[in-house]
Every structure is written in structure tokens, then in C-alpha cells.
Amino acid sequence: MCFRVALLVLLVSVAFPAGPAEAQWETIAPGGDTVCSDGSPWKFFVHRGDPGKLLVEFEGGGACWSGATCELDIYTRRVTVDPELARQQGLLVGIYDRDNPENPFRDWTHVYVPYCTGDLHWGSAATTHTGSRGEFVVQHKGAVNAATALAWTAENVPAPSQVFVAGCSAGGYGAIFWAPRIAAQWPAARLAHLSDSAAGVVAPGLFSTLLPAWNAAAAWPGFVTGLDLAGLDPAAISLPQMYDAILAYNPGAGFAQFNTTFDATQIFFYGISKNEVSLADAATWSAQMQAHLARIELNPNFSSYLAAGTEHCVINRAEFYTTTVGDRRLVDFVRELAETGSAGRVR
């Protein structure tokens, strides 16, 4: 489950805590060029808290990059979450549970960026794909949507001292993609990042398909040294390469990943990415995921937490508080990451 007031309510809530019947999550419907993959309206959600502590979270929800993949039900096509309704129904868990005193983000301002474009929050295109039933258009406008949410945030949360960028699954890729721009937007803030269940193990050369399908170049962080697309072979781009460049460009920020050793969803998408699902995929994916981590861990400002199991995403589940490796709880790892920018290597 990934998540989403009238002005008078917001003004009153600054001085008085919201009661059980009062809305706590604000819905922002920006309009303009924002849109979901099926043409439906896009919106984002904000829970106002301490203006000095900003959590920007990118929602997950699959991905697609071709007629064959985009006609499948493997990605979210419209905004389906409403965190305020979920709160009223008592369904908010993980980092959304503000009643839990162990939640590292319980008093932070939380900007939740929904995902409904099939492009990892990277796209700026209305792409015509050809599938089994002919041509159809997918609005791969994730980057347009994300940029709109970040522009609103820059105006409304102008001077945080701490910024935490997070996302699970597709949102984890959005989190690392947008982290350099978020760091540049608030250069005085201490920035930390967590990609949950987004290890980037895909078929070799897939980036050469993704980038044009989504027009990812329009928002690509090419200002980061080593990521200028003019000097890169798209077929050779990898997620570890992106991490190496972004971490080196932002040495004062702390970056991290959470994964499970046999994440069933990531293994599924690995098979989809190479157009062939096999019994060997689980072992191959797990080995490559750990090789990715080993490479990125050469950067001094990278931390990682690897848990056993097949679960996908943890920040949006109650297990955020109970997952433990050795004697190290995940919630403590994330708290340390948020507070110091470094949480070590947990296996």
C-alpha cells in the first residue's frame, strides 16, 4: 500500500493539533501538464509537519517501456491512493504511522509523489506504443509530475535543515534520479536518501530502450559529473554507474538501499526486462543485486541493509519496525541514516 483541506483547516492546524475527524493530509491537484498514463488527472499529497524536516517520497507501481510491456497490467495507470482516507480507516503503517513513537518521520513534513506513468518518475513523453491490439498512447509524464510537486515544495517548504528522499520499487528509482536536483534545491540542508527494493538489476542494454521510450533525457540529471548523456552510451548505462556519479557529486549527502535477498517482484521485472522468464532468474538476480551493492559500497557515503526473504518494499509496511538482521533493526538503521547520513552495511 503506497500513499496521498481547506485553507481554513490548514491555518487552524498550525496552532492546534488535528482531531481524529479532521483531515491531516492535503490533496494538491496542480493541473497543467501533469497527467497519468491513461490521461486521467494527477495529484499529490502533503502532510504538514515540522517545516525544518522534509520527507519527499516517490510512490512505486511497476513500469513499462514497449507495446508488449505497456499493454500488460504490470504498472499503475492512475492515482489510486488517498492517504487521508487510509488514515481515517486506520490503515497507515510503516513510515506513515505518526502515532508510532518509533517512526523517525512522525513529525516531519511529508510530500508524497504518486506514480501512475510507468516510467520510474523519469519520463516527459506521450509515447505511441504498438501492442497486440494496435497502437495506443501512454502518457509517460512521471518527470513532469515530479517536477511540479517539487516546485510546489520549494515554494511551501523553503528552508528545511533536513531533507530525506525516499521511495520503494519504481519510487526508489525516482528517489535516486531526483536526489541531485533536490540536493541543489536545498543546498544548506543535510540530505539523506533511501531506495527501498530498487536494485536496478535488468537486462544489459535496457537503458537504450528506456531513455527514448520515456524521453528521460528531458529531466535526466546531466549536470552531474559523469552523467552527461552526450558522453554516454545509453546501452552501457547501469544503475551502479548512476549511483557512483550522484554520490561523488554529493559527497556531503548520505545514500542507502534496502533489499531482500530474493525479492520476488524485482526478480519478476528482471525476467520481463530480458523477455524471458526462467527458473534461474532468482539466483541470477540475487547474485547481481549483491554485486551492485558491493560496487556502490565503494562510495564512502553509501549505506545498505540486506534482509533475508522475498518481500518487496518495507517502508510502507508494519515490518518497517520489526525487520531485524543480526541485532540491527531496520527502523534504527533508517533513523541513523536520517540523523547522520550514514548507517553502515547490514547483512
Image (cartoon, rainbow, N blue to C red):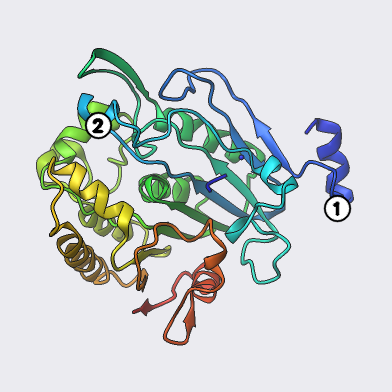
Residue 10 seen in this snapshot: yes
User: Which quadrant of the structure image shows residue 345?
Assistant: bottom left
Q: Which residue is mark 2?
A: 69
Q: Residue furthest bottom?
A: 327
Check disc 2 and give the amino acid type: Thr
Residue 242 is labelled as none
Position of 17 with respect to 124 (left or right) is right
Disc 1 or disc 2, which is closer to the eye?
2
Relative to 257, residue 336 above or below: below
The tag earlier along the polypeptide, 1 or 2, is: 1
User: At which x and y percent is residue 188?
Assistant: 54, 56
**Label 1, residues with CA under 10 Å away: few <14, some 14-19, many ≥20:** few
Q: Residue at x 60, y 53 (%)?
A: 54
Position of 196 with respect to 290 (left or right) is right
Q: Residue at x 51, y 69 (%)?
A: 334
Q: Are marks 1 and 2 in contact (CB under 8 Å)?
A: no
Q: Residue at x 54, y 21 (%)?
A: 41
Q: Residue furthest top?
A: 134
User: Which of the image's four quarters has the C terminus?
Assistant: bottom left
User: At which x and y percent is residue 204?
Assistant: 11, 47
